[in-house]
Amino acid sequence: MSTLKELSRRFRILQRRSRRRPSDLRRQAKNLLSSLVVEEDVAEEDVVPPSPRQQTSDPDPSPEHSSSQPSCSKSPAKSVEQSLPQFPDHVAVLNTLMEQYRAHQEGPDPTPKLRDNVASKVFRIRKFIAYMAQGGGKLQTLDFLDDTERMRRWVKTLRAMVIRETTINHYLKNIAQFLDYVAATPPPTCRLSKRVLFAIRREVRMMLRCMKRPVTLHQMTVKRAKDGQLISKALLEKCRDEARKRIPKILDELEKDKAQKTQFRLYGYVTAFLASIYGHRCGVFQNMTIDEVRNATKTASTYLINVSMHKTNQAFGPAQIALSAQEYDWFERFLGMKEELVGGAAAKYVFFTSTLNPCKNLNNYFQAAWAEMGLPKSPTFTDLRSAIATHARNNGTVEDRSKMSRFMCHDTRTADKFYACNLNTKEAWEHRQLFEKVLEGSDVPDQPVRKVGKRPCKRKRCDVDASPLTSQSTSEDEAEPVYQESGVSSVESDENSSEAEPSMIQPMRQATIILTPLKMRWSPAKSMVLKSLKEYPSRA
C-alpha cells in the first residue's frame, strides 16, 4: 500500500513538472511576436509589400476571388491584415485543425480554382480565430469561441473597416461551415460541450439571417450603378472590329521577337474579341486548355470549342465558343510557336504563363487592350457580360434571350430579380402611365358574388300524431310503412317536401328497437356447478 502511494506521489510530481506554466507560455509568445514585428518592420523598409493576389498563404478574401475572376472593387485585404490581430501560430492544435479543415475542403483531387477558393475560406477563418483568441487563456481548449458578445462585435469591426456587406456575408458563411466541422469532429483538446457548440452555431446562423437585407440592398445598389454605366452596342461593335484588325499584326510581331510583353498583349486582344461577342466569364478563358482547342469540333467553316471547367458547368455543361476559320487560325498560329515562348513547352492552358497555373491577370491584359483601342472607361469581363445580357433582355425576344443565356451559361432568374427593382427612366414612366390608366373613370360598384351551387335544404319534421317510440308497445310488424310516390326520386321529394300539401304528406315509418335477453357469462368452475345441478336436481 505504501509503495502504491509513493508511486502516485511521484507521478503527480512529474505531471506537475511537465506542465508548462502560463507565465512561461506568455513570455515565449511575447518574444515570438516581438521578433515577428521586427522582421516585418525591416521588410517594410526594404521591400514593397506584395499584393494580396501574389500571396499564396493568405489570398484575397473578397467574394469575387471565389468565382475565379479578378475583382473590380477595392479589396480590403490590407486593412484587414493591419487592423486585426495575427493568427496564433504558436498553438499547434489550431495549426493542425486548420490544415485538416483545408484538406477536408479540397478533397482528393482539387482543381486550381478549388485550391484558391479554399485558401480564401481559410484566410477568413484564421482572421476570425485571431480576433476571438485575443487575450484568451488556454487556446487549445477552444474556450475562446464561447463568447457571443465578441462574435457580434466581430461583424461591427468588419464594418468599421469599410468592408462591403457581401464580403462580410462571405466571412460569416465560411465561419458557419468551419464551426459545423468543429462540432462534428472536435479536436481532442476541445473542452466545449455540445450545448455550447450548438449555441455558437445558432448565433452565427442568426447573424447570417440578419445580413440578408443589407446584402440585398447592396446588390441592388451595385446593379443600379452598373445600369448607369452600361456599355453601348456601338462600343462592343468597335471593340470587335479593332481586335479583328490588330490580332494578325500582333501575331506577326510575336513570331519575330517572341517577347512576353507581346504575348500578354495578344492575350488582351483575343479575350476582348471573344468577350465582346459571347460575354463569357474570365474563368472560361483562364481554364481553356490546349487539348480543348485542338480537339474542337469542325463543321464546314465553323469550329466549336467546349470548355469544361468553368463556374456553372454543373448547371449548363461545358461553355462553348464558336469560331470562324479565320479566328481559329489565330489559335493555331499561336499554339504553333508556344514551344519557343516562356513556359510554353509544358503548358496545359491556352493562355499560359511561365508557371503551370492558369493566367490570373487576363483582366488586366483585357483592360490594357481596351484602352489601347481608344475606348472609354475601363470595364471588366463582368461589365461586358452584364451589358450583353441587358441588351438581350431589352432588344431580343424571349426565345432569343433564352438561347443566348444558355450559351452564356447565364441564369436569367437571378438577373430578373434585380431588373424588376431597377427600372430605367423610360420603363418607370411607362409603369406610371399604367397606374394612371387604372385610376381613370368613375368608380365601378362591387357586384355580389354568385354562389356556385345551391346547398340542399335540411329535411323538415312532419307533424303527424304518432304514438311514442317504445320498445314494448310497438313491434316491427305493427309499424305502418311509409310509401313513396311513383315518379319522384328521394332527393326531389326531400327538396319539395316543404312545398307539398298537407294531404299528400305520408306518415314517417316509426323506428323499433328490439332488446334480446342478456347472456350472463360464468366462470368455468361456476358453469360446472350449474351443469351438475341441472343433471341432478335432487342434490340441490
Image (spheres, helix red, strand yellow):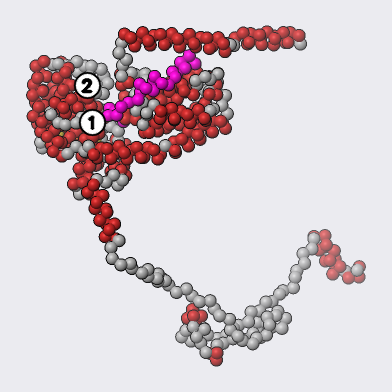
Residue at 14% x, 26% y: name it: 372
Looking at the image, residue 396 sits to the left or right of residue 159; the answer is left
Cα–Cα gap, marks 2 and 1 = 20 Å
Tell me where residue 35 sits by quadrant.
Answer: top left
- Marks 2/1 in contact by CB < 8 Å: the verdict is no
Q: Is residue 324 visible?
A: no
Which numbered marker is on residue 247? none
Residue 47 percent across, percent down from the top left = 31, 10
What residue did someone put label 2 on?
Answer: 352
Confirm whether the magenta stretch covers residue 461.
no
Frontmost of labels 2 and 1 is: 1
Residue sitting nearer the eye, 534 or 350: 350
Residue 292 percent across, percent down from the top left = 21, 29
Q: Amino acid at mark 1?
A: Thr
Where does the magenta region start and end?
Answer: 67-91
Q: Considering the image in quadrants, where does the C terminus appear?
A: bottom right
Which numbered marker is on residue 380? 1
Looking at the image, residue 329 sits to the left or right of residue 476; the answer is left
> Does dot 1 land on a helix, a strand or a loop?
loop
> Does dot 2 land on a helix, a strand or a loop?
loop
In the rendered image of this protein, does residue 530 appear above or below residue 488? above
Q: Is residue 509 visible?
A: yes
Looking at the image, residue 132 sits to the left or right of residue 21; the answer is left
Q: Amino acid at mark 2?
A: Phe
Residue at 46% x, 15% y: name it: 89
Which secondary structure dominates the residues rendered in magenta? loop
Of marks 2 and 1, which one's residue comes earlier in the chain?
Answer: 2
Residue 377 percent across, percent down from the top left = 19, 31
Q: Considering the image in quadrants, where does the N terminus appear?
A: top right
Residue at the right extreme, as displayed? 539
Residue at 39% x, 38% y: name it: 214
Label 1 crowding class (10 Å Cα cut-off): few <14, some 14-19, many 20+?
A: many
